[in-house]
Structure formats: C-alpha cells, structure tokens
Image (cartoon, rainbow, N blue to C red):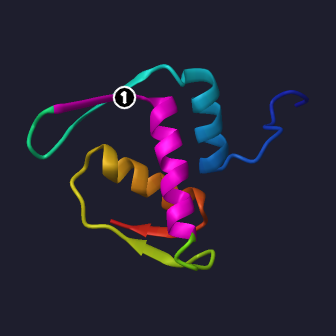
Amino acid sequence: MNGLMMDVPLTITSIMQHADRVNGDSEIVSVTRDNPRHRYRYRDAFRRTRQLANAIASWGLASGDRVATLAWNDYRHFETYYAAACSGYVCHT
C-alpha cells in the first residue's frame, strides 16, 4: 500500500492551491445574469478568492460560523463560496 495514500490533507484549500499551481493559466468561463461571458484565469480567481476571504475574516467571524449568499451562479458566487469554505466558514447558498 505504500505510495497509494495522500501525503497531504485533502481539503478545499489544498485542492485550490494545487489547481493554482498546476492549472493557474487555465481559463474559467461563466455567464453573468446579463448573459455576457466572463473570462479569467484560475490564478486570478484564486487571488480574488483570497482577497475576499481576508475581507470576510475582518468581520470577526469564528470558524464554523455561517456565511449566507443570495447570488447568481457566476464567477462572483464561485469566489464567495470558496472564500467562505477555505476560511472555515459554512457557506449557505
């Protein structure tokens, strides 16, 4: 069984870090509510997600607290979902 086990915790944060490292230049395409396509790279998405996570942390929430969203399923919601999850909060959509 040697070599078949993960040597790092399989968390959302570690998956995002891996995706940033391996696929940072890959494009994400989403459609906004007004129907134009929004295009940017994983690297940019993760940078924005980290910025949002820091902003949410400044609210003084504790790990396990809930963050609620009411949003269209587009790039902004993607960033909010992962910012909350990577910060230890529960994201209600």
Of the 4 image quadrants, the one containing the C terminus is: bottom left
Q: Quadrant of residue 92?
A: bottom left
Q: Nearer the viewer, residue 46 or 90?
A: 46
Q: Nearer the viewer, residue 7 or 36?
A: 36
Identify which residue, 46 or 81, lies in the foreground: 46
Q: Is residue 65 above or below residue 6?
A: below
Residue 54, percent across and down? 57, 60
Viewer-proximal residue among 92 and 46: 46
Q: For the magenta stretch, what is the residue range?
A: 37-57
Residue at (41% x, 49% y) in the render: 79
Main secondary structure along the magenta-highlighted residues: helix
Residue 47 among those drawn in magenta: yes
Residue 39 in picture, x, y percent from top left: 30, 28
Return the residue at label 1: 40
Image vertical order of residue 89 relative to residue 38, above or below? below
Quadrant (top left/top right/bottom left/bottom right) for the N terminus: top right
Q: Residue at x 41, y 56 (%)?
A: 80
Please give the name of the residue rendered at 50% of the width and 20% of the height, measured from the top-left corner. Answer: 25
Q: Secondary structure at mark 1?
A: strand
Q: Amino acid at mark 1?
A: Tyr
Q: List x then y, in percent, for residue 50.
A: 55, 50
